[in-house]
Amino acid sequence: MTETTTPPQPPAAASPAEALLSIANVRVMADDACILDLPALTIGAGESAAILGANGSGKSTLVKLITRQLYPAYGADVRIFGQDSWNVFDLRKLLGIVSTTEQLDFDADPPLEALDCVVSGFFASRGLWAHQHYTREMVDASLAALEDAGASHLIGRSMASLSTGEARRVLIARALAHRPHALLLDEPCAGLDPAARHHFLDMLRGIARTGITLLLITHHIEEILPEIDRIIMLRGGRLDRDGAKGELLTSETLTGLFGLPIEVTSRGDWYDAAIRHLP
């Protein structure tokens, strides 16, 4: 690694006051089938929301639409942070992303050390390369993010050597080190054991209290943080319901969404769901 005092090039302009997502007339096609059909959806700045739905409901497609891995059919209007056109590397500097798919990329060869993984988030790349010049400020921000994520002790370890929970904390640090406008969490607890999930969700609550916009994609309502109040339900690639958590996280709505008899219970500000087994 070669440290330099040369400042990085700033990303394309975007205001934190702009909506994270504003879309209209969106249709995403795959093999002549429409896998996402959303006439309109807006997620405002500073508004945290959970996208809830069964497998195949369109959650992953929506994530890829936001991260510019997929593009809709002609005639759609998709604006991320108020802009309809993005250099994908600039966008990823403003949108912190944590997902199991991303973690698999960092586990692969060649080995990637934990601190390098976090610093490389400033360049939206996997690792650091000779043409990338990082600054002392970037290193300090990365060290602080690792400390906040409870992952400082992992410095010097390769990502492939970490447990699922440890690697997820490093990815959170990577996502937050460059102070993004929003954090996109795509099934962030997948693969975590109950203890690791508990600690991970507790860490996310601390992040949510800082005021950063959170977008949580999940099909587990027990992972929806108390700080998230808006629920957006997808079913069959379409918007099923959109509203306040207290109104939508009910046995009736979850039964309709997943097509199974589901019993919803609340524990303070948390919710649980279980399949109702008929006698």
Image (cartoon, rainbow, N blue to C red):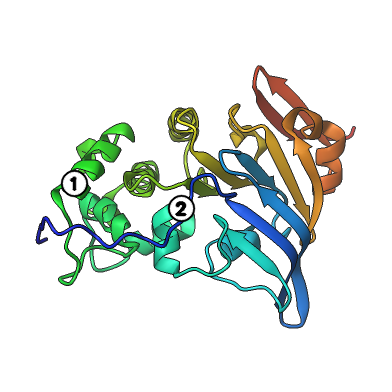
Q: Determine the secondary structure under disc 2.
A: strand
Residue furthest to the top: 268
Residue 51 in sight in this render: yes
Residue 103 appears left or right of 24: left
Residue 193 appears left or right of 75: left
Tags 1 and 2 touching, CB below 8 Å: no
Circle 2: residue type? Ile
Residue furthest to the bottom: 32
Residue position marked by numbered label 2 in the rendering: 97
How much space separates mark 1 and mark 2, taking CA atoms? 21 Å
Residue 53 appears left or right of 146: right
Residue position marked by numbered label 1 in the rendering: 137
* Nearest-to-viewer mark from 1 and 2: 1
Q: Give how far across and how far down residue 129 sits, in percent.
A: 19, 69
Residue 157 in sight in this render: no
Which residue is located at x 54 percent, y 55 percent? 81
State which quarter of the image contains the N terminus.
bottom left
Which residue is located at x 76 percent, y 82 percent? 32
